[in-house]
Structure formats: C-alpha cells, structure tokens
Image (tube, rainbow, N blue to C red):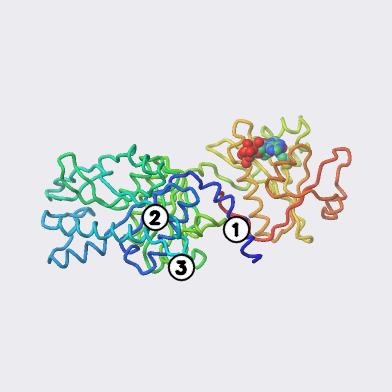
Amino acid sequence: MDHFVKWFRNSTPYINAHRGKTFVVCISGEAVAAPGFQDLAQDLTLLTSLGVRLVLVHGVGPQLAQRLAGAALELTHHEHIPVLPAAALPALKTAIGATRLDIEAAFSSGLPQTPMDGAGLRVVAGNFVIARPVGVRGGVDHHHSGEIRRLETVAIRQMLQQEAVVLLSPIGYSTTGEAFFLQTEAVATHAAIALGADKLIFLEEGEEEADARAGSNRPDQLDPGQAERLAGAAGFPPARRAAWMGCIQAGRGGVPRAHLIPRRREGALLQELFTRDGIGTLITAGKYDVVREATVEDIGGLLALIAPLEARGILVHRSREQLELEIGNFVVMQRDQAILACAALYGFADEDAGEIACVAVDPDYRELGLGHELLAHLEQRAWTRGLRRLFVLTTQTAHWFIEHGYRPARIEDLPVARQALYNYKRNSKVFLKTLEAAPATRRP
Ligand SMILES: CC(C)(COP(=O)(O)OP(=O)(O)OC[C@H]1O[C@@H](n2cnc3c(N)ncnc32)[C@H](O)[C@@H]1OP(=O)(O)O)[C@@H](O)C(=O)NCCC(=O)NCCS
C-alpha cells in the first residue's frame, strides 16, 4: 500500500503536466497485431481519461506484407522509398481497413474491471491527410507511393476538442481523388509539427528494445543534434532510423518533446510518461544550455553574475581569490559564451552531507526553469558522491527551496564543521532535504 501511495503521489506532477496537452503516438502494425495490443489500448485510453488529446498513427507493415504475399506481389524500394504499383493498391486498402477495424475494436471494449469500463471513447478516422505522388525519381516511377502535402489540422483539432481519438493511417488522398501510400513515421512527425503537439511518441519495435534502459545502451535524453549523430552512426539499426529522424525533425520543428519507447516492454508508455526518469529516450530541443563544471576562466562571468546579488545581501560575499580556491565546487550554465546561471555544492563527506550555495540566475533568464535545472543537476551530483543530506542557508529565497522539497532545519542540524562557520549576524535560515532516491533526471 505504501508503495502505491508513494507512486501515486509521485505521478501527480506528470498528471497535471499532461492534462489538456496534445500527444501524437505512433505505433507499428506489429503492435496492433501483437497479443498485448488490448493492454496498449487500455494505456492509451487511460491517457485520454487524464485529459490528454490523442492522435494515434498506425503502421501496416505485417498486414500489408501478408496481403501482398497473398497476391504474389512484393513491395520494392528505391532510394529508401517504397514503390507501390497500382496492382498493390487493393492490398494496401484492405490492410489499412483491417488494421483500422482492429484498433477501433480494441478501443471499443468496455469490460467491467478494466480501465476501459465506461470510457466510451470515440475513435475517428477520415480523410485528414492530403498527399501527392512521389512521382518519378532516378527514372523509377513510384506509382502509388506518396508524400504528405498537408494535414486538415482544423478538422483534427475539432475532433480532439470533442475528446475523440484521431486515428491516422499511412495513406493520404490527392486532390485528384487518388490514394497514396505514406511512410507511417512521416505521417506522425508531420502531424505533430502541424498540430503544434506537445509530444511525439514512437513505440519502437525490436527485441533488444524490450530491455529496460538500465540494461541497454539506451540514452535517457538527447538534443536533436546528439540524436542525429547517434542515428547517423555506422551500426545504427536501419529499422529504427525513420522514428529517430522523425523525433529530430519534430524537435527542430517546434515539438518540445519527442519520445522513443520500447513497445514490447509492458507498460512502457505509462512508465515513460508518469515516472521521474522515464524508460525510453527523450529528444528535446529545450536543452540549449550546457551545465558544466566551472573553471578559473569563468570567474569573470561568475563575478558579474553574483556581485549585484552580494551587494543586495542576497548572497554572501566571495572575493576573487576565494572563488579561485572554491571553483571546483561550482557549476555553471552556459549559452553560447555567456554564463546564465551558477550554483555550488560543498561536500562534508564524513557526514554524508552537502551544502547547496550561491544559486544565481541572470535576471534576464529567470523564471524559465534554469534555477530548477541547476538545482536538479547539483542534487544528482550530491547523490553520486554519496551525499544524502543537503543543506541550504538562505535569507530571501526560502520559499523557492521549500518548493523544491527543502524543509526548515536548525543550525545544530548542520554538519559540525559548517556550524562553526555559521554567521549569526547574517541570520540565514537553514533548510534540509534528505535524498532518499536518485533525484529525477527529467522534469514533468
Ligand atoms: C532563486 C533563483 C535562483 C530562481 O531561478 P529561476 O531560474 O528564476 O527559477 P525557476 O525558473 O526554476 O523557478 C521560477 C519560480 O520560482 C519562483 N521564485 C523565484 N524567486 C523566488 C524567491 N526568492 N522565493 C520564492 N519563489 C521564488 C518564481 O516566482 C517562479 O515561480 P512560478 O513558476 O510559480 O511563477 C533566481 O531567482 C535567482 O537567481 N535569485 C537570486 C539569487 C538567490 O536568491 N539565490 C538563492 C540563494 S542560495
């Protein structure tokens, strides 16, 4: 029970953060055909119950392959683009039709004792994607293979507003009334950008992807540049490239967060969205700022940042010499060449304790979460160094620390060595946070 209560409380910030947001979730045809699809549909239903506006994009890989094989046809590729002859179009239409029906059926179940009980969710599919033919490339006619021209975003938004799940298939219609086969990942990426979605989520296939991140080399968080380097490296699985490139493109196209989640891992979607560290890889362009250890070269920038705060009595005065001596304790957040923020962690290793000090954000960059990020970074550092009790002494910023989980403490609670240095004239308030688990690496 304790575990449940703790887990539920910890998930609250994520529930609040996701409410009213638009998520584009891309699943493969394999996911729909898999025995666990009903569970995935339940997890997606849960998202909508928590107020998420859901656009679901599905693939048709195995469904199409099966029907093409039945018609003694095969999908060929030219320059990584499928070539879909007119003879294969009926197979595509039946594959998409059948997959849509399976999805609609899964979302319609409402058995008692399941999360679907009483959900009454509507799934809406339609002619939301306008396409044009790929045409002839390198002398090869791609026939019914198409590219996305635009999305009917107004119509999709109306459906989302009515709390329906919008279902998009890898097919688009041209203004001449023809149907064209589209790449599923491209539909999802395009939809996320065009709708200004808050998240683009790919549920990735692959046995190795079923491993938890801890047991694999799956990176936790990347910016689009890092993700591009990784996806472009030799040995990167070609089957995963389209989803990765979609996340990169979405990140650059203004989608704040793109997630790659192992589909075969039970409950991966919920773990990614409602736990502190997630389970997949998050690609976010939000990380323009580099947090790094300070060096003596930063002292000029540090002084410029903290001197005005020292003058106002918010921070304790530190001379240039003192900063030089203590520079190893400082981290800075840098954008281009400018130092936007700094903070320090002083360790008292024999007491498993640390002091957070000198947290300062350039006034032009306040209230953007930089202070939060820096504090989270120092808490991570403290955790890795085995420091479990974190102190902070402050005169004017008490509430900010309280909001970050720090609780009032007494001077006697400070490490003995720090008590001796306590400045009674300054009369700072003491706050303490006990780290019980590794601090979160991601914000809600
Ligand atoms: C405190 C400080 C580091 C926060 O940095 P930041 O990047 O603006 O913080 P975040 O964006 O993560 O958080 C902003 C939130 O903190 C609140 N906040 C900022 N300063 C606060 C303070 N002194 N007391 C209480 N809340 C404060 C803001 O109102 C905002 O709340 P909201 O999102 O509910 O509107 C920054 O204001 C600063 O440099 N202050 C001067 C130096 C200082 O006081 N340092 C601490 C002494 S060690």
Instruction: For marks 2 and 3, give the one nearer the viewer.
Output: 2
Give the mark nearest the N terminus, 1 or 3: 1
Give the mark nearest the N terminus, 2 or 1: 1
Q: Position of residue 10 (x, y in %)?
A: 61, 56
Q: Residue at x 38, y 61 (%)?
A: 109
Spatial CA span between label 1 and label 3: 24 Å
The kind of residue on which mark 1 rests is Phe
Q: Residue at x 30, y 41 (%)?
A: 151
Spatial CA span between label 2 and label 3: 16 Å
Near mark 1 (Cα within 10 A), the count class, few <14, some 14-19 or many ≥20, is some
Q: Secondary structure at mark 1?
A: helix
Number of marks present in the image shown: 3
Label 3, on which residue? 211
Name the foreground residue: 120 vs 295: 120
Does mark 3's beta carbon lie closer than 8 Å to ligand 1?
Answer: no
Label 1, on which residue? 8
Relative to residue 102, is residue 329 depicted above or below?
A: above
- Quadrant holding ligand 1? top right
Label 2, on which residue? 202
Q: Residue at x 41, y 52 (%)?
A: 201
